[in-house]
Image (cartoon, coloured by chain):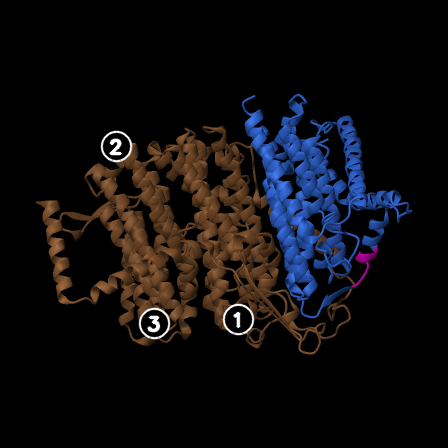
Chain colours: A blue, B brown
Amino acid sequence: MSSVIIQVAQALLLLFLAPLASGFVSTCKARLQNRRGAGVMQPWRNLRKLFAKDVVLAGHASWIFRTAPYVVFTATVMAASVVPALLVDTPLSLTADVIALVALLALARFFLALAGMDIGTAFGGMGSSREMTFAALAEPAMLMSIFVLSLSAHSTNLTTMINHTLNTPFALHPSLAFAFVSMLMIAVAENGRIPIDNPDTHLELTMIHEAMILEYSGRHLALMEWAAMVKLMLFATLITDLFMPWGISVQADAAGIALALLLWLLKLAGLLLALAVIETGLAKLRLFEVPEYLSGAFVIAFLGLLSYYMLEVGA
Amino acid sequence: MNLSLALALSACAVTLAASLSAALPQGAKRGVLCLLLAISGLLAITGGIAGLLHGGGAVTLPLGLPWLPMHLRLDALGSFFMLVIGALLLPVAIYSQGYLRSEQQLGALATFLPLFVLGMLGVVLSDDAFSFMLFWELMSVSSYFLVTFEHRNLENRKAGFIYLLMAHLAGLLILGAFAVLYAASGSFEFSTMREAALSPSLATAAFLLAAFGFGTKAGVVPLHGWLPDAHPVAPSNVSALMSGIMLKVAIFGFIRVVWDLLGPGDFQWWWGALVLAAGSGSAVSGVLMALQQHDLKRLLAYHSIENIGIILIGLGLGMLLAHFGHPMLAALGLIAALYHSINHALFKGLLFMGAGAVLHATCSRDMESMGGLIHRMPWTAACFLVACLSISALPPFNGFVSEWLTFQTALLAPQLGGALLTAVVPFSAAMLALAGALAAACFVKVFGVVFLGHPRTDIAARAQEVDGWMKLGMVIPALLCLALGLLPVLFIPLLDSIPQALLHASLADSIHARGWLWLTPVDGAHASYSAPAALLGMLALGGLAFWLLHPKGLSLRRSMLWSCGNPHIHARMQYNATSFAQPLRRIFSGVYRPVEHAHAERPVHKLLTDKVSYVVHVGDLAVEHLYRPVGRLTLSAAKHLQQEHQRGIHTYLAWTFATIIFLLAVFV
């Protein structure tokens, strides 16, 4: 099996499993709240319905509004296909390192926010303003927590970083613990989940992501929603890659890939279940407590960097 | 004299000729001025590239002082900055042909614009301290006349005065740096200064004088006070040149004096740390201040401060690494800084040209009176969007490449000195990340408020697209931004002679270790980035999605937008520049100290609000706490002195007598 085929298969898996992952989270949440829930397939059904529907555009929406769904979708999928899920050394992982991956997500966010401003409603502007504000705090925190790992691996390439983790004997590094906590906090925030944002409602005044895509409909909305699901998948895979890559296949052989697939799905399920528990257990933060949460994540990541330099470099 | 130097000198000569265009009749003035400037830009580009590829040369002209002829030399560093100047001068000259069309009084502009360019070209070429200072002052003084071009406004005259004051303060400090170097070497020529061995204390004095002098001119926080006032009031083509190139010439001066004349051998550990701290501080505070502006050109001026900070982060990392004996990594930091210099010249020049186009169309710099311009000005909007994406460091444009290289330098830095010093490096990377993310927020605000949504005023609703010259002037840098973002692997080897000359380190082999598609700063396993592959992948994916989804039977319907059932939608209900930045104003209120006045009129009942008004002012902390006190102190000292002026003749005689006694006591 060549690595190119695995690369393509892996990207397609990420793309097509993403709605299932979202469905899995909402089903878990429903069960935790003693509801039956709509089932794991519901996001897929939503997408299919949206793809079949007409697009209704606001009267003076510009080409920014019409291209934004495609840019957001492709940038997110591009970022997702860079992340190794099954095989360590995939061809695309050379194309973009972690910094470029974060920048691709930033590109998607830039167009999402522009689309929010384009229609000229107060809702869109509010969503864009808040999204960009919080992203400005979340992005450096995410880079910091990734840098903790890149410093010890001497690399920002995901492939090299995973190889480094696989080849060093397992030990509990304080810096990694800090980075892990920070990364989890950022992943929750970046995906617009409780306690930062509520993905289930259009009606809360503190909403962020949903406010920006309020005017979208039909296939445009489907692409936006799908991109958000892929992003959740991306973050989950990134966390498993960075902090618990064990099981990922080093060589492109069938047995290794099958094992890697099984373990990857298990790890994903674990992380998503944890997300469901967090979302059920916590209330949404007030809007102006979010910066404190995010700067908390930033400080934790920076502590990770400091503890790496203080405790681990010399030792 | 070789080809590259001849090209560079002819660029200077053409610029000098352009300054004579003021004498031409009114009709021919503009065309000749712009044509000659464009030719000069083209000559500077070719001269710069030829100098980088084949090396430059030196020439001694019999000008200047009798015992000190003018030494000119085009080396690798000079060639690169020659290229930076030309790369922006060419599009700006084309743009000016359209921009100056409605200008009635071209006289001052036609004289001083070419002289300003000549000053910058001369600084880059000069090889002795005397000609350096001569051209430097030519640049500063002629740009003063450009800042005060519309001198009928009080605001412009004030900005011009502060600019002249700060420029001369900077000039004085730079002169001091050269004086120290002269004292150590006994010659004004750079070649002798380079050879001279300096004691550490003399080297430190020269470094500090140069750092503060060039830092003032480059607009490093807190020496930036003149910049946000001077850039907005100049005509937009001049702001493009001032922000795009003049600040780079200050960076050039810093590299020339500190890296070249002093040399990496003299670096002390805290020099790099100081530059790194100044860079990080400028980057974050520049973008934070930019976020709170609603004057479009003032906002862009603050972003120049941010980008100078990013360049200094690269240089500071390079200086630290060079001091601790890692010439390869230092070369990477230097390359990152240089790459960001040319990137910033291109996208900031483009942004100011775009702002000029918008100013031309709406007669206003206030973003709160714009909106929806993308429908009326599609070309301007598209070019401006490219510049916004570039300055926000988003792939596949050029800003991302240089920030990526800066990140790589910071991450590759090994243990340096003590733990504190080592921790400064990742902290600067964190500040760089914060600045980049805040810049993205700021440019969503700029593009969203100016070009998207509904027009907020009638003038904005009736705006007209600019003419072909201005469009062409904006399209060129936009294409260059994309090219530099896609093909850094082809461009960086061109710069390789600079670290070779300054650090004796070459990155040429490692940069394209994996072929021209992949940018690999040190080796492929460490980090790689391929903009062409990423762009191709995205185009393929996006094209596929579009092809699969595009209306085949599905129609696209236009309709009213959702307004929660309220049919009366007004353009003023949109988020504007002030409201967009409100969350950040609240989060960083400690930095901003906003002065807010919210007022609600309730004439009928205390629960029924008729009118609401909200005014907010965010001042510049450095201006309020550093410049104002100094200004007040100077004024009060002048006031005390003034009283002495009005005394009788006997007091004057007494003062004269006291002075003579004092001088006799000291010197005899």
| Left or right: B529, with B279 as reference point | right
Are marks 3 and 1 in one subunit? Answer: yes
Q: Residue at x 10, y 51 (%)?
A: B661
Instruction: Choose the circle earlier in sequence order: 1 or 2.
Output: 2
- If the image is split into quadrants, where does the C terminus of chain B sit? top left
**Towards the viewer: B615 or B20:** B615
Q: Nearer the viewer, mark 1 or mark 2?
A: 2
Q: Which mark is residue B58?
A: none
Magenta residues, as a range?
A49-54
Q: Residue at x 50, y 71 (%)?
A: B364
Chain of the residue where label 3 is placed in the rendered structure: B
Looking at numbered disc 1 in the image, what kind of residue is underneath it?
Answer: Glu
Residue under numbered circle 1: B465
| Subunit that carries the residue with mark 2 | B
**In terms of depth relative to the viewer, which is nearer, B267 or A61?**
B267
Mark 1 and mark 2: Cα distance apart in space: 59 Å
Asked if residue B412 lies left or right of residue B63, the reply is right
Is B212 left or right of B532, judged from the image as shown? left
The residue that mark 3 highlights is B106
